[in-house]
Image (cartoon, rainbow, N blue to C red):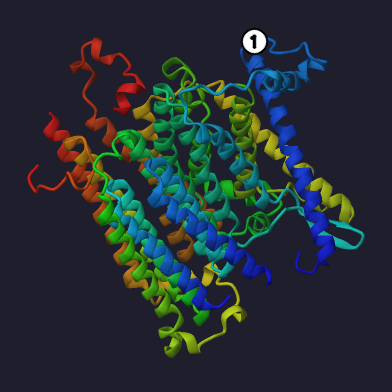
Amino acid sequence: MNAEQILFILFGAVSLIGAISVISFRHPIYSALSLIVTFFAQAGLFLLLGAHFVAAVQVIVYAGAIMVLFLFVIMLLNLGTLSAKGAMGGKLKGFAVILGILLAIEGIYIATNVLNNTAIASAQPATATPNTTTYEIGELLFSKYLLPFEVTSLILLAALIGVIVLVKRESESEN
Amino acid sequence: MENLPLSVFILSSIGKILIIVHLLLIGVMAMIWSERRVSGWMQDRLGPNRVGFQGILQPVADGLKFLFKEDLIPNHVDKPLYVLAPAMLLVPALVTVAVVPFGSSITILGHEIPLQIADINIGILYVLAITSLGVYGVVLGAWASNNKYALLGGLRSSAQMISYELTLGLAIIGLLMLTSSLSLREIAKAQGAYPWHWNFLIHFPAFLAFTTAMFAETNRLPFDLAEAEQELVAGYHTEYSSMKFAMFFMAEYMNMIVGSAVTVTLFLGGWHFFGLETMGGPVWSGLISFGIFFVKTGIFLFVFIWVRWTLPRFRYDQLMNLGWKFLLPIALSSIVVTGTLWITTGSRLIVGIGNVVVALIVASIVAGLLAMKAPKPAMQDSDSRVTPTALDAIE
Amino acid sequence: MELKYYLILSALLFTTGVIGVLVRRNAIIIFMCIELMLNAANLAFVAISRSLGEATGQVFVFFVMTVAAAEVAIGLAIIVSVFKHRETINVDEVNSLKG
């Protein structure tokens, strides 16, 4: 086993354990923390894949901003006491888990068998490719994908306005 | 760095890590001492001067006191997070320093060793990423304490950190456009030997915005709403004592030191100073450049202390106004101005002047808008002018 | 590492997210599970981008992240306002269209 494989197993295991903890912890704060751990392990996987810039952005956006917002809301609403109420029944839960396992088997089947016949599998430079630089990503973003890039700014603007409208209506109804 | 043999690389890296981590820890002690002495000097009193020469051993005495205090964990806390939180604040502060170049390079036994632990090509993003994690220690410590004052401190802190992080990130984009590199070493190298080559003159409004945002990120006065003594007992660390409190305390000072080092690298020319860093042989020039960097960081740290003992704390709404209505527009406009002027003229002088002019215009427009919206003072009776507490503001 | 191991990991993470959405009733945790699913997709994007040797997949990760950020901002605002209205964020109890 070389270093890359060991690191892949390490990060993969951590991210999976984190993901399972997200759905099994009772308290939302602990779920949020497990999710942060998962995001970190994923940033590690991105580093293994040579996507340094994406790894950094992953930590900045997900761990640094999105999860802080989650924690902020959990703390603001003091949600810990409410989560136990009205949990799903045992039978339904089992059914959901079985469905999930079926989905996982499907995914694994696609990853191992179906993709072998596509263009992705035939192009196999794999580890030989150098790390993607920030320059490359920037160039793609501002040339080939300029239109989608601008559309994302519209999405953000729409989200911004949406949030303001939501909050504004509330404070008006309170008065 | 790539041409170093593996053994030399590993040995030199371990050496650098040991030196830097110890320097940081000693730096924390030195900062605690100088903060108390400088504040004493500013307030025309003495400050601690009994333990050792001029009280220089006072931090050691403080540390011992913390160490020997009972390490108590209150019954009502959420134990795992309560224990974890101080470490979650301290570790990010420690690991940020890995990418900061603290000197040019030094030649030992024919190997040129760069004075930096790791020169990664996304250096500044790494700094931003790790800085943004510092908030977890504060927020989780506050929540785990199961104490309303601590919780309020944590809520304030998370809102503040999210708001000022934006400015922190946006303020450096203009600089990155002109340097066209994310590596801190390249950024430091790109600035010339003389002060008028340094980035703080070209991006002066961005420099001010960045510095202010960094003050906010370190949770110090005038931005210490998370631990406002008059309102929240001690804020997020109300329930902490002994070494756990000491770790919060150390993390604050460590954040200051690392933040100053990053600012010096980004805006104040790194290890450059009038060509002094190129004098002497391959060994001496490295040491001199390290010395220059050290002194610059020290001066910047003095500014930290100076500001703390000069400005009073912001009110919560003032904090948010400053962050969202002044710093953010200024940082954004500096991106636009730097980009436009650099493409059209290609002159750093014009970019520098344009930045200042536009920042002044933006700030005055915002100030004008705020003044128009604010109720006229004559309408207010004297009662309503009583300062609202930040507790009201957070509701 | 071969591409398929990354894809398997991505599939497993995605499945965990799906199970979470199905099993949990707390709106915040359902939200986190959606983030998890988006992240699993990101992992697949980056892995395939690596194996094709071009950066397009990583560009797509940015779009996913932007959408995720926008979604979180809106979603959390909705959760906060629902909570203020009904004192609960259990998705089974928030089932009427009228406020």
Q: Residue furthest left?
A: C98
The quadrant holding residue A49 is bottom right
Q: Nearer the viewer, residue B314 or B140?
A: B140
Q: Residue furthest right?
A: B109
Q: Nearer the viewer, residue B88 or B271?
A: B88
| Res B82 visible | yes
The residue type indicated by label 1 comes to: Asp
Looking at the picture, how far across and down is residue C61, in whole percent? 41, 67
Point out the image quarter for the N terminus of chain A.
bottom right
Q: Residue at x 43, y 43 (%)?
A: A30
Looking at the picture, how far across and down is residue B263, in whole percent? 60, 44
Looking at the picture, how far across and down is residue B21, in whole percent? 73, 42
Label 1 belongs to which residue?
A: B44
| Res B367 visible | no
The quadrant holding residue B303 is top right
Looking at the picture, how far across and down is residue C40, in whole percent? 41, 65
Q: Nearer the viewer, residue C60 or B323?
A: C60
In the displayed structure, B183 sits above or below B237; it is below
In the displayed structure, B77 sits above or below A21; it is above
- Viewed as shown, does residue A100 lie left or right of A20? left
Point out the image quarter for the C terminus of chain A.
top left
Q: Residue at x 39, y 67 (%)?
A: C41
- Viewed as shown, does residue B92 lie left or right of B33? left
Q: Chain of mark 1?
A: B
- Viewed as shown, does residue B194 lie left or right of B394? right
Q: Residue at x 28, y 57 (%)?
A: C22
In the displayed structure, C32 sits above or below B135; it is below
Q: Nearer the viewer, residue A10 or C23?
A: C23
- Specify few, some or many for label 1: CA neighbours under 10 Å numbering under 14, 14-19, or 20 or more: few
Disc 1 element? loop
